[in-house]
Amino acid sequence: MSVRIGLGLFTGQVPPGSQRTFATEYREMLDLVRLAEAVGFDSAWVSEHHGASDGYLPSLLPMLAAFAAVTERIRLGTGIVLTPFHDPLRLAEDAAVVDQLSEGRLILGLGIGWREEEFRMFGVPMRERLARTTETIEILRRAWTGRRFSFHGRRYRYDRVKVTPPPARPGGPPIYLGGYAERAVRRAGRLADGYITDADAIEEVRPALAVFDEGAREVGKDPHALGLALLQNAFVSREGDAWEMARPGVAHQLGTYSAWDAGADTPDHDELEPIPPDDATMRRWTAAGTPAEVVRSLRPLVEAFGDRSELHLIVRLHYPGMDFETASRAVEVFAEEVAPGLKGD
């Protein structure tokens, strides 16, 4: 059984009314990543959105460049880059620079996007998001060879271009793809080096992974050689009620998406008022409790998918508005008392 424990997703959100500044948020993100490496985490991951009133992190690779500067060992992942909003050559260059800064530690997670306001903001038709994403993947792989190339697709065209420097890792960073619809998951198996998804109930992840594996086999790839990254809310405390510590931040985190679905952060409703699920739903999605309770909650995921050659279990232990002391204690306790129970150490 092999599992790598990641910390994330870092989103840089500052809730309305919070006394925190973005400078404080970003500085403490770096402090938490530095701490995570020191106590034994294997990776750190960031997530992207645009035009959010709470400042949801819009620029992933600059942030990972900062992560690279304060770490030496852990992998650095995007979960995920919203591909249609990025010029493929610039994305190839930025990723290559981060990979060089980190000496080959970048994992580039990509997705097609879903929020209509973001497509309007960038002037990108939603109907083009799939073509833009699939073409970008091909362009990235060509660009990372370091050789001059031409490309003539439906959305992008380049004539005898060259991306330098090349990434530190030969062939470039591994590309993980997200997606929920069956066609998207199958496509990820065909095109990507790994699959990134929410760690929902095992009975929901397992069929999606089977479709991903089928897509890989269709193009002659060994699915078990491909990576799997599972995103999981968590919080842990030795004393006190872990759920009550995490609850306000989880409500903002999850309630943001419902608010966007309801039209928040648009020209017609230019503010964000999170609409969180009920407490029972939030608790079901968040493995919160004592170290032993969190191990019991997360261990089935490891047992179900630990046969993959590279399984990343990415746990979120820092939520919007949470102070550094609270988050750092959770990171330390998770590393000391939860991770060994998941890794079998």
Image (cartoon, rainbow, N blue to C red):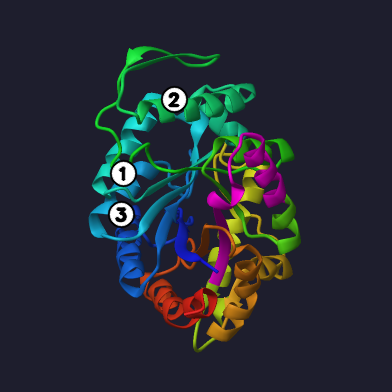
Query: In this view of the protein, can residue 87 be seen by the observer?
Result: no
Left or right, residue 180 beside residue 55? right
**Res 99 label:** 1
Residue with the most extreme bottom position = 239
The percent position of residue 200, horizontal first and vertical second, equals: 68, 60
The percent position of residue 181, horizontal first and vertical second, equals: 71, 40
**Residue annotated with mark 2:** 139
> What residue lies at 58% left-to-right and 70% top-to-bottom?
247
> What residue lies at 48% left-to-right and 68% top-to-bottom?
317
N-terminal of the pair, mark 2 or mark 1, is 1
Residue type for callout 1: Asp
N-terminal of the pair, mark 3 or mark 2, is 3
In terms of secondary structure, where does tag 1 sit? Answer: helix
Left or right, residue 25 beside residue 310? left
Quarter of the image that includes the N terminus: bottom right
Q: Vertical placement of 193 versus 307: above or below?
A: above
In terms of secondary structure, where does tag 2 sit? Answer: helix
C-alpha span from label 3 to label 1: 11 Å
The percent position of residue 32, horizontal first and vertical second, equals: 35, 66
> What residue lies at 48% left-to-right and 39% top-to-bottom?
50
| Label 2 crowd bin: few (<14), some (14–19), many (20+), radius 10 Å | many
| Mark 3 or 2: the one toward you | 2
Q: Which residues are magenta?
A: 208-234
**Residue annotated with mark 3:** 67
